[in-house]
Amino acid sequence: MLKGLEVIKVKFVGIEGLPVWSILHFLERTCLNHLKLVTIQRICELSAEGYPDGCFSVASSSAEIFPGRSFLHKQPAPAKLIVLTEKAESPADFWNVIRNFKRPMVYFTEGNHKIPLYDFTYEEAARIWSFKEQSPPVGEIIGAGGALLDLLYAAEREEREKDEHINRQIGQTAENIDRMVRASQTIASAKTPDGIKVYAESILKDLMQKQSQLNKKIGIHNQEIDTNI
């Protein structure tokens, strides 16, 4: 079974004068980037634990916009899956789906079941907790903390400055914030197999660049972090 990820809530404020479609675009893209980043984090975690590449597969089409029910109750047809393996198929095929699809669905094979690494019903899935269309806009996003910290502070260039800023916001010591492992740290870990890491780091870089531009356009500031979820 998948281990639960620590969940946090981040409140943010944008700049004044933005049209509603700009704000909604920011919220949608941030949640989709969170989906990808948590998925990659999960792949790296499980690979570091010794699970082989063949345990991972990705659906050959994006998740439905209106899925109806949890993907936990929808076992995908084998013919519609691309398996991560170094022999039968190119690993690039697997990773390109994650990079290019809006809502990639990656599964982990455990026994006879395929478990989605990210599902909208999971506690750590990104959710828009609150949103006020005002000037400036104010919103709250809940989700896996390690990925949210990476995304909503994507414009912070220096890791030390990022930690200090986060610590000021949540009033915790550096020791406590270090306890919450960011997705980027999991990907960069020496325990992550090199064959996985090279693709994961490439997608991470792409996600961070895109999210950084989003954060700048929305003028995100005054983030407040709540770890008591």
Image (spheres, rainbow, N blue to C red):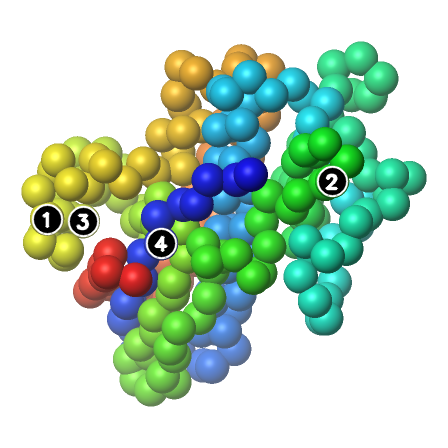
Q: Work out which quarter of the rendered image holds the N terminus and state it.
A: top right
Report the disc number at residue 166: 3
Could you tell which of marks 2 and 1 lies nearer the N-terminus?
2
x 39%, y 73%: residue: 129
Q: What residue type is labelled 4?
A: Val
For mark 3, give the secondary structure: helix
Is tag 3's residue or tag 2's residue first in the polypeptide sequence?
2
> Disc 4 versus disc 1: distance between alpha carbons?
16 Å
Q: Is residue 207 left or right of residue 173?
A: right
Q: Is residue 111 visible?
A: yes
Q: Mark 2 points at which residue?
A: 113
Q: From mark 3 to mark 2, how far is it between C-alphas?
A: 39 Å
Mark 3 crowdedness (10 Å alpha carbons): few <14, some 14-19, many ≥20: many
| Residue 99 at x, y percent in the picture | 64, 40
Does the residue at mark 3 contact the one at mark 2 (Cβ under 8 Å)? no
Q: Please, is residue 50 above or below residue 223 in the view?
A: above
Q: Residue 172 carries which label?
A: 1
User: Which image quadrant for residue 120?
Assistant: bottom right
